[in-house]
Image (cartoon, grey):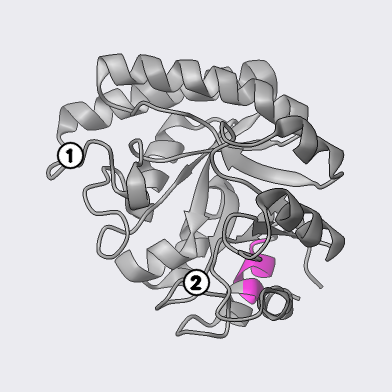
């Protein structure tokens, strides 16, 4: 039996419905719910659904390495925390840099310098302290550079692991996205074992296509076994498009992680 919580990204399923109705539908089917950008949503209406929110985007703008953008990141993280409190949402998600239209970095980076690593470490230490002050956990998500997010600094899971482990705070964890990791790194079961105590959330979708488990090459039942083997008790979230019927996609997700 699983000991982790199953959650579904409301941005990517039941596309025929308004987002608020998607949240209600996911909740009615027995899953927790995740959202992306909170600035374009009616927060009071989301609260009224009674859904269990597990994660939301933890910033509006900014990045980890440029002084003016670091200030934007920290200020918008503070705003996001207040929204997370209203939603009773425990986790706020970050990326290596701000993402724009289509998930492309606002400021693409070809070479990540040593100075950028040091600046990112300092910024994330401040983020972790902010999380500690408010009882919220920030998660740093890995992204693939080959298909979806070219030019994202600190994109690989090995990069996010290095930063999170260096900060070494319970208020900064990895959002280990296995869809992105499969494209960029592979060897997922060993990756899960290696990241272990630093994982704050697991996100999943199959490869290729970024759809629900069973539509591609990843053996998600084996991943589920690996998570049980490391006694993982956090969130497993489907951040995937439905290949067809969304109800069926969620059923496939549940069966892969039962």
Residue 139 placement (x, y as % from top left): 53, 40
Magenta span of residues: 224-230
Q: Nearer the viewer, residue 25 or 237?
A: 25
The Cα atoms of the two marked residues, 1 and 2, are separated by 27 Å
Residue drawn at (69%, 68%) of the image: 228
**55 displayed left or right of 21:** left
Residue 112 placement (x, y as % from top left): 17, 39
Residue 60 placement (x, y as % from top left): 46, 29
Mark before the other along the chain sequence, 1 or 2: 1
Residue drawn at (79%, 61%) of the image: 25
Residue 233 visible in the shown view: no
Magenta stretch encompasses residue 225 = yes
Q: Nearer the viewer, residue 177 or 188?
A: 177
**48 displayed left or right of 32:** right
Q: Nearer the viewer, residue 77 or 191?
A: 77
Disc 2 element: helix
**197 displayed left or right of 64:** right
Magenta stretch encompasses residue 156 = no
Q: Is residue 16 above or below residue 124?
A: below
Residue drawn at (21%, 48%) of the image: 151
């Amino acid at each position: 039996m699983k000991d982790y919580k199953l959650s579904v990204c409301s941005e990517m399923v039941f596309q025929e419905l308004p987002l608020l109705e998607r949240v209600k539908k996911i909740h009615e089917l027995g899953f927790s719910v995740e959202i992306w950008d909170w600035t374009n949503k009616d927060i009071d209406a989301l609260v009224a659904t009674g859904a269990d929110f597990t994660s939301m985007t933890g910033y509006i703008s900014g990045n980890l390495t440029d002084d003016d953008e670091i200030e934007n990141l920290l200020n918008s993280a503070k705003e996001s925390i207040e929204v997370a409190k209203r939603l009773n949402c425990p986790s706020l998600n970050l990326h290596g840099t701000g993402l724009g239209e289509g998930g492309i970095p606002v400021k693409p980076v070809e070479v990540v310098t040593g100075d950028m690593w040091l600046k990112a470490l300092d910024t994330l230490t401040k983020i972790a302290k902010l999380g500690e002050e408010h009882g919220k956990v920030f998660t740093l998500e890995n992204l693939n550079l080959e298909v979806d997010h070219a030019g994202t600094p600190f994109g690989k899971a090995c990069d996010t692991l290095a930063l999170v482990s260096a900060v070494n705070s319970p208020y900064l964890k990895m959002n280990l996205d296995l869809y992105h990791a499969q494209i960029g790194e592979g060897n997922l079961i060993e990756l899960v074992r290696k990241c272990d105590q630093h994982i704050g959330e697991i996100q999943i979708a199959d490869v290729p296509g970024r759809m629900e488990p069973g539509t591609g090459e990843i053996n998600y039942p084996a991943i589920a076994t690996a998570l049980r083997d490391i006694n993982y008790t956090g969130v497993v979230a489907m951040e995937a498009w439905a290949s067809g019927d969304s109800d069926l996609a969620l059923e496939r997700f549940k069966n892969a992680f039962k």
